[in-house]
Amino acid sequence: MTEKTDNRTIGYRDALREALRAALLNDERVFLLGEDVGAYGGAYGISRGLLEEFGSDRVRDTPLSESGFVGAAIGAAIGGMRPIVEIMTVNFSLLALDQIVNHAATLLHMSAGQFNVPLVIRMSTGAGFQLAAQHSHSLEGWMAHIPGLRIVTPATIVDARGMLQAALDDPDPVLIFEHAGLQSEKGSLPPDPPPVDLDRAAIRRPGSDLTLISYGGMLPRTLETAEMLAAEGLEAEVLDLRTLRPLDEATILESVRRTHRAVVVDEGWRSGGLSAEIAARIQEEAFFDLDAPVGRVCSVEVPVPYASALEQACLPQVDRIAEAARKAVGRHG
Amino acid sequence: MKSAPSLPEGTSTEHALALLKEMMRIRSFEERCAELYSAQEIRGFLHLYIGQEAVAVGVMEALETQDAIVATYREHGHALARGISARSVMAELLGRRDGCSGGRGGSMHLFDATTRFYGGWAIVGGGLPIATGLALAAKMRGTTEVIACFFGEGAVAEGEFHEAMNLAALWNLPVLFCCENNGYAMGTALGLSESQTDLCLKATSYGMPAWPVDGMDVFAVETAARRAVLSIRGGGGPTFLEFQTYRFRAHSMFDPELYRAKEEIEAWKERGPIRQLVETLTELGVFDEETRHQLEEEIESEIEDAVEFARASEPETPETLTRFLTSPRDQA
């Protein structure tokens, strides 16, 4: 496969910024609000330069009031605007859970379809930077429990560039989880970024021996594991969920029915987590296609610690993913 | 010593009678609700507004069609005063398809796009940020809309109250914060839960005008709301009104009312908004038993019609359960 020569290499963070800028240029109803999105340029620098270009009405710094500004964004959304909220980390979004879960997620159904909430909330998620237990958790799977929300996790440059507009095109609330570990990734982007489909998972690497199911920040190391396994003669298919709610069950099942084995790689905790949901769905729908139990590689169930060795031990690593893959195919190291 | 009865300057007899009728209408509607609750036709929670009618009725007088309302779980009165039909509200209370929330919300979650009635929210304080956001949208779209946000005094203890007050003042947004201080957050008296019981002080600390209003006097409510709305519509930013009122009934139908004395309730009933206005109009010679009879007859007929309509409306079928979970994609 040859890459088009007019593609360019761009960073994840820059792709997110371009998406924001394009959204602000495309639709005058769009505005950005959140802590430090303006003068500071965003905690991850994603909105840098946008205040100067679009002004303080449309790039709106907020006080440290997560519930207040998320609720205000809900109100603005039902009042005819298209707000994009930035929350610094998923941990801080817990202060806005009342607005996200009790209000944004319920309004459409509770009003019998009278009021939809065209709201986009972006936030960082995940560990890897020694930020300890209040800035490092992966709670997107938890949010995926809630009917009325769409949960998306851009793991590639194309998705980082394209998912925001797709989220804005959705008439209902969309939460975008941008993994902190992906911020410095680089990749190739076509000059006219293609629209992305938020309903479908993607096969990032084809393979025939087993399916590694992952998303977000775990995707690069899952791909890395697949390459390592290939050297051992094991061809792993790597599936990027992309959207955690609603799950693209068809793509998951199609892959597992071909490979007959699956391992879920999730930075979230195992108990009651997204990996449990996926494993359950596979056994409900494809039990007789399976040649092995569905494996899971998740974070160790502790609050994410500060010290590097402890933090790394907490997270799914290539060796743990590889071991789970070998176990699924009956090979033991 | 009582002063000679009079209507506020510029208030016609017709207007006073219309306000009275609206308060009586809400009262009768809710008394009927209590009966239907006892008969188990209305289920779930039922929070009656009886005693506080002057607040919703007076504030709605000051609002225009373009304006929007955000209310709480005790919102039958606001919904009716705003113009949602008694039929539609009653059908919702009975959980029927023709209810204003299609039977999905019930008593606590009335919604109506036509009248810009944005709930019907049952998390105390949760509506304030949303009202603030509606006001932000109104301002960013360059309109002169005012957003009226109703909540009880219990909400002032919530963080969302303070977050919303700050944002509304910081961004100079067109919100009318209507605090209905009925003295009790469910069963907890204000003095037992707040270190500062002067609620207006909380609002003024955010730099917005705030003043207390006799919430049992519908004219006082209307006058205050008009004054506030005029200022807000003119770009003056948010205003906080503390309506001092009282709920004559229990918090909900499950409440044994162990936390307040019968004498206190009776004393407030003496100052009831309907009773006060009836007395004034009677002394002015524009209200008598015949007028009362006529009003009651009109109201009863509307409410009976609403009950019949609600009873005749189909219950939603379980097949429709997952409708409205996502919007049609072209709605963005």
Image (cartoon, coloured by chain):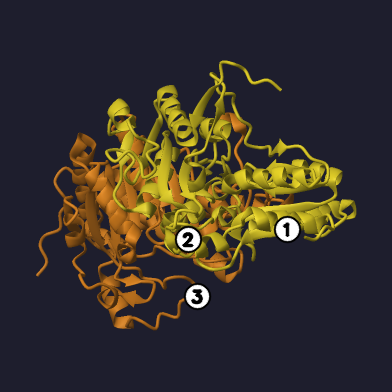
Chain colours: A yellow, B orange
Is the C-beta separation of discs 3 and 2 under 8 Å?
Answer: no
Query: In the image, is B41 to the left or to the right of B83?
Result: right
Identify the residue position indicated by label 2 in the image: A308
Identify the residue position indicated by label 3 in the image: B254
Of B21 and B139, which appears nearest the observer?
Answer: B139
Is the C-beta separation of discs 1 and 2 under 8 Å?
Answer: no
Label 1 to label 3: alpha-carbon separation: 58 Å
Name the chain letter of the residue that bears numbered label 2: A
Name the chain letter of the residue that bears numbered label 3: B
Q: Secondary structure at mark 3?
A: loop
Amino acid type at mark 1: Glu
Residue B328 in the image: state x and y as whole percent. 62, 34
Identify the residue position indicated by label 1 in the image: A323
Q: Secondary structure at mark 1?
A: helix
Q: Is residue A60 above or below residue B261?
A: above
Name the quadrant containing residue B278. bottom left
Q: Secondary structure at mark 2?
A: helix
Amino acid type at mark 3: Phe
Q: Is residue B278 above or below residue A167?
A: below
Asked whether the viewer can see residue B293, the reply is no
Label 3 to label 2: alpha-carbon separation: 55 Å
Of A42 and B206, which appears nearest the observer?
Answer: A42
Residue A284 in the image: state x and y as whole percent. 81, 56
